[in-house]
Amino acid sequence: MGSSEERVVAVIMVGGPTKGTRFRPLSLNVPKPLFPLAGQPMVHHPISACRNIPNLVQIYLIGFYEEREFALYVSSISHELRVPVRYLREDKPHGSAGGLYSFRDHIMEESPSHIVLLNCDVCCSFPLEAMLGAHKSYGGIGTMLVIKVSAESASQFGELVADLETKELLHYTEKPETFVSNLINCGVYIFTPEIFSAIEDVFKQRKERANLRRVSSFEALLSATKALPADFVRLDQDILSPLAGKKQLYTFETLDFWEQIKTPGMSLRCSGLYLSQYRHTSPQLLASGDGTKKATITGDVYIHPSAKVHPSAKIGPNVSISANARIGAGVRLISCIILDDVEIMENAVVIHSIVGWKSTIGKWSRVQGEGDYNAKLGITILGEAVDVEDEVVVINSVVLPNKTLTVSVQEEIIL
Amino acid sequence: MKALILVGGFGTRLRPLTLSVPKPLVDFGNKPMILHQIEALKEVGVTEVVLAINYQPEVMLNFLKDFENKLDIKITCSQETEPLGTAGPLALAREKLIDGSGDPFFVLNSDVISEYPFAQLIKFHKSHGGEATIMVTKVDEPSKYGVVVMEEGTGKVERFVEKPKIFVGNKINAGIYLLNPSVLDRIQLKPTSIEKEVFPKIADERKLYAMVLPGFWMDIGQPRDYITGLRLYLDSLRKKASVKLASGPHILGNVLIHESAVIGEGCLIGPDVSIGPGCVVEAGVRLSRCTVMRGVRIKKHACISSSIIGWHSTVGQWARVENMTILGEDVHVCDEIYSNGGVVLPHKEIKSSILKPEIVM
């Protein structure tokens, strides 16, 4: 685009504590972006994908969690990637575009030629290098990652229409009631710095409209009902939708997996998607074993180096075991996330479940979910420090932290 | 004199309220639960209260500094690093409880509310000259609990029977004890049960006495009993002709309203209601058998019964909230919504009715 030096800054929106009640009970103990999927914090996956961007100079995490929640993670990942990673705290939610805009000085510090914007709770292959190449060839101010989904599920997302040849974004609408298109917005974008002018224009327009409104008291009544504050600007509805069809925005389609990680059930599914991705990108992270010296492993499994797994256990598919967990003799684990310091005693079975930090699972007990990642009680979730006594069965239930289960339960939430 | 209050753990039975504050600080009758006990202890001359806890000391300590200053009583924490049962914490706090004076010390269970007749307890303890006195209370269904079998006249305890299958008596341990320092010599620093291990030994030596607790008694560690307990507490305030109770044409039965709360026109409040500081109850609201905590706003024409509304929540216009609905902190029930036993975790908005008892996370 005429700039001789290409520099890319990545921005990842991580949200905040009051927004994520759907991620309870896990979010009672850890901010959602730091919940581990396939052995790594959720936010680690988009950050890791940024590695593949040539000329990446900075990564910003923007959210409204307390700074100290991210301090440790940010300093260790900066060190590991050798790219500065910083957490910027919003004083209150400003919407996806508002947040980006309020930190524009930080983002433009290194005079980037391109800005990659990612949402932390999106699970996909993040084909950023290819997307950046496409963006440069289109010559617009922004490119959005899009994917085809089933017609029924499309209405949960932002639906869009793109020109089949030029890939230009022609039309965009958020969660429409009638069918518009089965092509949806993935929440991954590449922008040139002109995006900030586009956001500024929207602010200006809002101010002008507000000035006009003072004239009519009826209008004042209208605007008083559930209006968003003037500084809450959503990227999709407020910025991108009006720019559709003006040769400014383009699309890049991915044929790989894509999911939103809104609930604990989905985090289990996405952990599995990332584990299967490791098979191509980082096979050394996956465990292996055949029951002789190490436990039998089937399918994609991650085991933290400090975890201890008895050789007679059988693990997988889709299992992730975190630090210092102890898996006893004869244990069977299928499709589950076992968090730090968990102890699973002999012959226990865990299926379609998330077992919280420091919990213990007794001998011959069975902790199981149905495996419906979208249902309210579709997987079983044990919060921090839950003790399941020997031979107890827990099915499709959610147990809050610090509880002891002495009798079997089904389809229950235990506070 | 000294006192030990067994606060214990996570208060999971009082969730969602205890997701916001530790259990001893959950308000009851417009005062933190534990303050009721501390005030009663202060009244009989206790100079130091030790809280045996195993959870969130930092949150507690800030509040306690405040109480210490207001009440002029020393409050310290004794923190368990592993669960020590019902007797172990006494051993852990040994140094704090023995001051060389030979005075007996109180041990209270933090979930218990009653009239705390500590002066009578001290008198009885001194008169029988035994080593330990426990207060007992009469219940309708003794086989759910540990029953204390005692001699009618003297109160000397013969034995304890856990969940008896046949009727052996109807008095159960009320969770209020007055113990001589020598009791501490019987308790090692390890998980120990005071009812199963310590008291039976003292009873065998004929040195354990029991006193029937006059007045009301309730273990308010879970929501249903909390609401019943409020009725008993307000009833006892009425018997003492307390000026704290509200009166007026819009008040029915026993009602406690904090002086900073604002009540609108045309409301009917009571029986058995407590309304906390800074609450706003708008016009035309009906409240019965419920607790409304600090900073809550109840909007016009709403109707609430048998429920607990957590701090800073709002209940919308024409909403109907009943049947053991428990709203955690900062929960907003929209206009015209019906909640039948909804248990709602903090920071939620209820936009659709809850037709049968359900936990909303």
Image (tube, rainbow, N blue to C red):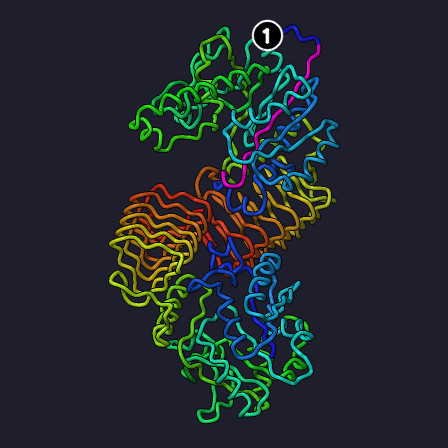
Label 1 element class: helix
When the figure is inspected, residue B96 is found, relative to residue A269, above or below; the finding is below
Residue at 66% across, 52% down? A328
Displayed quadrant of residue A268: top right
Please provide the residue range marked out in magenta.
Answer: A5-19
Q: Is residue B291 magenta?
A: no
Residue at 44% across, 10% down? A245
Residue at 27% across, 49% down? B301
- According to the image, label 1 marks what residue? A137
| Residue sitting nearer the eye, B255 or A336 | B255
Residue at 33% across, 29% down? A220
| Residue sitting nearer the eye, B57 or B45 | B45
When the figure is inspected, residue A265 is found, relative to residue B64, above or below; the finding is above
Q: Is residue A11 magenta?
A: yes
10 Å crowding of disc 1: few (<14), some (14-19), many (20+): few
When the figure is inspected, residue B96 is found, relative to residue A96, above or below; the finding is below
